[in-house]
Structure formats: C-alpha cells, structure tokens
Amino acid sequence: MLKIVVFDIGWGGEFVADYLAAELGTVEIIRATSWQSQLYDIQDETLLYNEVRASLHEYIGKVDLIVLGGYVVSLALDFLQKTYPQQKFIGMSINYYRVLQSRYNINRVVLLMNDLLVRRPIFEEIRQGLPESTVIVPDCSGWEELVDVDEMSVDVLRFELKNYFALTSPNIPKTDHCLSKAKPIPISSPLREQVINFLANSCRTDVRRSYALTGGFSNMDNTTLPGQSICRQPTARIAQSSDDDTLIRPDVVLLLNTHFWGIKEELSEVFGISVNVMDFRNLLLHDVCRALELRGVHGERSKW
C-alpha cells in the first residue's frame, strides 16, 4: 500500500489528512502534525526550513509522498525538494484559472492567510496571477487557536470581519438583498489611500494589521511590485453599504490557510451567497494523484 505523510501545524494538517483519507481509500495516510504554533511566527526562512526538516526527518526516504499540508510549511517545499531529490514532496498551491473563472469580474480578492506569507514570494505570485484585482489581506491572527478549540463560530467571524467588509445581516444569513443594492465606485488614487488607511485602522486597537494592494500600491512599503505599474489597474472597485459606511464587498475569498477549511461554511454564511469562498483541496488531490500516478488526476473523486 502506498504511504503518504501529511505534515502541518495544528488542525490544518488534520483537515488535509482527513480529506485525502476520504478521497484515497487505498492509500495509507500518516499524520505528522506539529502542535508548535510558534512556528507561525518564525521570520527567518532558514530556521523554518530546518524546523520542517527536523519534523519530517524520520519519514524522508521511507514513504511514497510527503504532503506539506499548509501554506506556511509549503514555503520549505523548494528547499526540501533540492535537499532530498529522491523523496517526493508536494505543497499547497493556488488554482488561478479556477479563481478567474469563478466570476465574470474579479475586482476584489480577500486572502485569509497567515501574516508570515505577506512578504514571501507567494504574495508576489498572487499579484501576478490576479493582476486586475485589488488584493485585501485582513488580519487573521488568533484564528488558528480559535479553530483548534472549536470556538470560531459565525458570531465570532462576524465580529472579526464587520469592520472590514459588508457582511450579510445576522437576521437573514441566507440572503444578500441589502448588499446587492451597494453601489460600486471607481477607486481613484486618493481613494486608494483612504481604503488602505481604513483597512489599517478600522479593526480593534490592539496592534491589528491589514494590507491592501490596489493598482500595485502596498501600504507595507508604498512601492510597486515587480512587473506592476501604478496605472495598469483602473478597474479596481470598493462598495458602499446601504448605511453609507465605507465597507468592502469582496468578489472572492481565498482560504490560504488550511486551518480555515473547517470554517468554510461559516465564512460562506457571513459573506453571503454573492461571494465565492474558495479553497484548493481539489488541486491538492490532483497533485497527489499525479505524483503517485493514480487515477483522479483531474481532481475528481476517486472511484475505488
């Protein structure tokens, strides 16, 4: 029987392991979950690589595939592949085609992910993959711990996100009629700065961080990213809610933290039916099947 090791920090790895176990019934799934949440705070990439390698040392060369079941630990993918060329590794990735095909216009993309990823190459990759979109990254610090203890409810999510985004009414969670009346307006250069300042300051006062990239601008360093120019993104929009508060209405929400797979339904309820909440578990299944030369390489449910 083929053996796959799934490694991540906390329940994200458990969600990934559960998913692959359900899809790949004839493959043995070995869980190598690290509960050291402090790994999320490591800024030195070399230290992160070494921690991941140490956690996987006993499995390298002894299993058919090692899956890095989170976007943070997937930062070590290239390092592991170069260091151990005889061992197969795959990490988490993003299906940009699926994102772009999910709606006619993708103007506002919300990334729910760990803060550590913001200054890593994956963030530039996202900007290149979604060049016509405004990318918004609200602060999700502390969410993993709430997911771990099963305390991330719809009410908690609504409280965490209400100052950023136009959400569904708590009294009518399944409809989006009020939000559908929101009037989109173009983001001019001055308004870009207002949006950035709004996102940076609108949350609770205890050192909360948020980032917005609009037309190549970033409130992190106020510079353009490679390949981007200031004037190439004229179609970015925000929306105003019915009570005239400036709140963002996203088109797509991407779950770039596998911890958040467990709260996908709650997020869909909070954002409403007009917003696509997406993860990329099917792409992961595709990559696993391709690496092991199994059927189901198109991400379809396994048939055996």
Image (cartoon, rainbow, N blue to C red):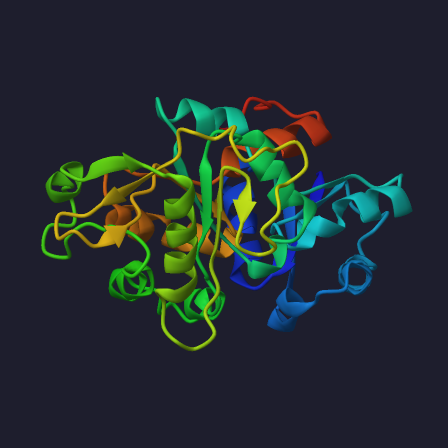
Camera-side residue: 278 or 64?
A: 278
Taking the image as shown, residue 155 lies to the left or right of residue 110, namely: left
Give the residue furthest to the bottom: 206
Dividing the picture into quarters, in which one does residue 95 lie?
A: top right
Residue 300 shows up from this direction = no
- Describe residue 17's horizontal placement relative to residue 198 as left or right: right
Give me the residue at 39% from left, 26% from top: 102
Which residue is painted at 39% across and 33% down in the image?
Answer: 107
Residue 122, percent from left and from top: 64, 44
Decide if residue 237 is in sight here. Answer: yes
Q: Position of residue 167 (x, y in %)?
A: 23, 51
Residue at 43% of width from left, 53% of height from top? 196
If the image is split into quadrants, where does the N terminus sit? top right
Q: Above or below — where is 294 with respect to 262?
A: above
Q: Looking at this view, is 122 or 60 the one in front? A: 122
In the picture shown, does residue 168 fall above or below 187?
A: below
